[in-house]
């Protein structure tokens, strides 16, 4: 082993070496499975500006089972084979990110120079033919097993010669013949490959000039199938499409299109990065800015379906598609896929389909969240606008950095917007009818009156049978609706008990932690040691994250609140609630106006806080959607009922409510806030009702935003 010595330091310099097994090790470890390995090779064809790629599984008596991948791309010259293809981890594509064919240009999909090692994972040997335009055809042979069995990398070679046979290419291209396949390619695995190849090219891109064909064992070339997605995947029941700008602000369009026809509903949506920042649960990972995101602009389209038995039957009938294949087709494309310059980045295997954590979110909301198996999403990024959003070497996830974290939070907010709008289109009117209306359907008064009328007219008893049948149907419908409602509230009560315990335990501990941190800051701050300052910041952020978690569940926990006393000074409670939000209010530059009067109400201060805090929290959050100079929160108090009660109005200057949401905003599970559970206003309105009052809203709001009102009993004098 050659060694050199550094006379000044006295150290010997020992060169690194690599064992030939590195080829097999990198191929096995950096490419997680065989399907991903094949996709990497197809991406190489795309990078070579191929118009068509053919994948053929064949079985030959002399050579055994093998996989053939042929394309009509630019192919390689002798110099490219030696200087680029045989150089592992070459920076060639990084230095040459664009490929050209005539007047057309493509950005390459690979940059790491490791994709060819997919061949080493798939088979023992490689026979390759490749030809560049106007150049001779070259034959390259590599025996990966022999290379791995060697002792020194200097003895590892690829054999190359001019092709002695007639070239198989019309002008140019590459043909890979992977022999000695290591994995078992049965029909199920080939079907899985077909599903994943269908996701390789983004529907965002106008890439009709890149086609993929596949044929399995026993299929002839005539039976090769062009890989395409089912028609119904392009016509979803629910969808949201749009984009995020360079600051992380989102604009998009929601569309509801019933499968069997009917009223199509479209709605323009928007959410500012400032609002997305407010609902980030864990801000300790990175130093998120509340002002803007730095991940870069991107576009998206997320499609969703209901997949119960009746829903899949509806899709099958509408699109002349086998019902049994509907779920399979959605499952094959399920999840949100990220494409860079039109080519799939993530996910490349089933293990990574839920990389955004949609299924984990689903258990945390009283209402309806979408699961990965209901969603087919496409997100389009570019190397120019999103240079930091990169996949890891194993192709299973995105690299960990603040830009990726921002990217993920924006996408979660977009999914939440889709879920909220979908909820509105799925709500059954009967489910949200007041309980009094539901029980009214159990009354027999109208039936009795009609039977008496028939009797007075001298009618036969048989004439009352239709009336009885109609009443029986009405009873059945009412019973079913009431049963559904009580099951819903039963589940809600269980969640409320858990939430009460959670909020109690968290706040007991964060209060102590917070007091200790305040003591440390006041006693020893400001910190001169940057390491101590950073540790303090992380700890403070962690406590705040726990507080936000408690705030999320607080509306549910309030349902089990026990009254301590029945008197409060309304203005004092309003100021206390604003003081609790002082940090957020000051950060968002919200001006608050509270009357100077003194109004005594017969309401427990804890319950009054729960009502006011919910309205204040919502107002401050939604005003993040308007310019800072226009943010104002105003309270107005008006005596009513001859001075026995007081009506409290809370006006803000945010974007306000949509007209169709004026009634729905109080329904359980209905929310427009990403990450919300849709219970805050429900609980607040129930607390008001417990004091004989009513909570309401109006459209448009007094100050151009939202206006909410509720009335409370005044404390009697003496």
Image (cartoon, helix red, strand yellow):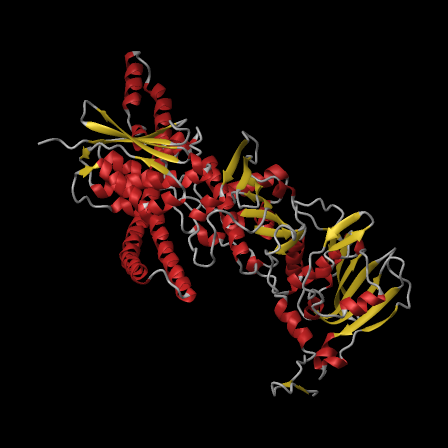
Of 308 and 387, the residue lying toward us: 387
Of 503 and 59, the residue lying toward us: 503
Quadrant of residue 245 within the rendered picture:
top right
- The answer to whether 106 appears left or right of 169 in the picture is left
Q: Tell me how many marks there are.
A: 0
Of 633 and 421, the residue lying toward us: 633
Quadrant of residue 240 within the rendered picture:
top right
Quadrant of residue 519 within the rendered picture:
bottom left
Q: Residue at x 22, y 34 (%)?
A: 691
Position of residue 389 measured from the top left corner of the image (x, y, whole percent): 59, 55
Is 587 placed above or below 474 here?
A: below
Is 428 placed above or below 67 here?
A: above
Q: Residue at x 26, y 43 (%)?
A: 576
Is 596 placed above or below 199 here?
A: above
Find the residue positioned furthest to the top: 457
- The answer to whether 155 appears left or right of 617 in the picture is right
Q: Residue at x 81, y 60 (%)?
A: 75
Decide if residue 496 is in sight here: yes
- The answer to whether 649 appears left or right of 420 in the picture is left
Q: Residue at x 40, y 60 (%)?
A: 538
Position of residue 120 measured from the top left corner of the image (x, y, whole percent): 70, 70
Decide if residue 354 is in sight here: no
């Amino acid at each position: 082993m050659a060694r050199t010595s550094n006379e000044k330091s006295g150290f010997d310099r020992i060169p690194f070496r690599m064992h030939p097994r590195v080829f097999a090790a990198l191929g096995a470890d950096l490419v997680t499975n065989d399907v991903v390995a094949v996709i990497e090779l197809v991406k190489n064809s795309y990078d070579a500006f191929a118009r068509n790629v053919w994948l053929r599984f064949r079985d030959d008596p002399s050579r055994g089972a093998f996989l053939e991948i042929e394309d009509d791309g630019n192919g390689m010259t002798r110099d490219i084979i030696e200087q680029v293809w045989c150089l592992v981890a070459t920076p060639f594509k990084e230095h040459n990110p664009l490929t050209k064919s005539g007047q057309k240009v493509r950005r390459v999909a690979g940059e790491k120079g490791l994709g060819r090692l997919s061949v080493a994972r798939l088979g023992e040997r490689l026979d390759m033919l490749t030809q560049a335009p106007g150049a001779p055809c070259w034959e390259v042979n590599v025996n990966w097993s022999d290379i791995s069995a060697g002792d020194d990398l200097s003895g590892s070679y690829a054999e190359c010669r001019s092709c002695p046979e007639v070239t198989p290419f019309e002008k140019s291209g590459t043909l890979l013949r992977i022999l000695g396949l290591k994995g078992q390619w049965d029909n199920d695995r080939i079907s899985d490959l077909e599903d994943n190849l269908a996701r390789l090219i983004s529907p965002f891109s106008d890439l009709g000039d890149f086609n993929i064909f596949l044929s399995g064992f026993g299929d002839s070339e005539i039976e090769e199938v062009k890989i395409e997605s089912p028609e119904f995947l392009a016509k979803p029941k629910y969808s949201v499409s749009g984009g995020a700008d360079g600051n992380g602000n989102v604009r998009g369009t929601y569309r509801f299109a019933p499968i069997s026809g009917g009223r199509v509903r479209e709605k323009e949506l928007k959410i500012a990065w400032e609002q997305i920042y407010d609902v980030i649960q864990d801000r300790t990972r990175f130093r998120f800015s509340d002002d803007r995101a730095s991940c870069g602009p991107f576009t998206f389209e997320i499609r969703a379906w209901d997949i119960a038995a009746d829903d899949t039957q509806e899709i099958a009938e509408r699109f002349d598609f086998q019902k049994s294949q509907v779920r399979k087709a959605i499952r094959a494309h399920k999840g949100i896929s990220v494409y860079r310059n039109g080519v799939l980045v993530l996910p490349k295997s089933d293990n990574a389909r839920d990389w955004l954590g949609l299924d984990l979110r689903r258990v945390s909301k009283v209402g309806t969240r979408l699961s990965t198996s209901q969603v087919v999403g496409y997100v389009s990024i570019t190397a120019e606008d999103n240079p930091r959003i990169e996949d890891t070497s194993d192709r299973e996830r995105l690299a960990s950095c603040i830009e990726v974290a921002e990217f993920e939070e924006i996408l979660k907010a977009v999914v939440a917007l889709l879920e909220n709008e979908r909820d509105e289109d799925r709500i059954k009117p009967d489910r949200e009818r007041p309980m009094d209306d539901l029980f009214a359907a159990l009354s027999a008064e109208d039936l009795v009156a009609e039977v008496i009328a028939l009797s007075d007219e001298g009618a036969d008893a048989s004439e009352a049978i239709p009336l009885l049948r109609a009443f029986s149907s009405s009873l059945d419908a009412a019973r079913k609706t009431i049963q559904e409602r009580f099951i819903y509230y039963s589940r809600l009560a269980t969640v409320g008990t858990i939430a009460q315990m959670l909020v109690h335990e968290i706040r007991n501990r964060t209060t102590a932690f917070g007091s200790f941190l305040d003591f440390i800051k006041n006693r020893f701050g400001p910190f001169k040691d940057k390491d101590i300052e950073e540790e303090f910041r992380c700890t403070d952020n962690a406590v705040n994250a726990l507080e936000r978690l408690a705030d999320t569940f607080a509306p549910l926990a309030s349902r089990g609140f026990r009254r301590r006393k029945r008197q409060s000074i309304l203005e004092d409670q309003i100021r206390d609630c604003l003081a609790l939000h002082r940090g957020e209010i000051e950060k968002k530059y919200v001006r608050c106006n509270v009357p100077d009067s003194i109004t005594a109400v017969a309401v427990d201060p804890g319950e009054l806080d729960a009502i006011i805090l919910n309205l204040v929290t919502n107002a401050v959050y939604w005003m993040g959607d308007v310019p800072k100079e226009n943010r104002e929160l105003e309270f107005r108090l008006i005596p009513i009922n001859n001075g026995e009660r007081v009506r409290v109005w809370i006006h803000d200057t945010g974007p306000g409510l949509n007209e169709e949401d004026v009634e729905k905003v109080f329904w359980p599970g209905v929310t427009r806030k990403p990450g919300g559970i849709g219970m805050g206003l429900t609980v607040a309105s129930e607390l008001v009702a417990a004091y004989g009052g009513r909570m309401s809203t109006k459209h448009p709001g007094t100050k151009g935003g939202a206006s909410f009102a509720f009335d409370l009993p005044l404390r009697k004098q003496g």
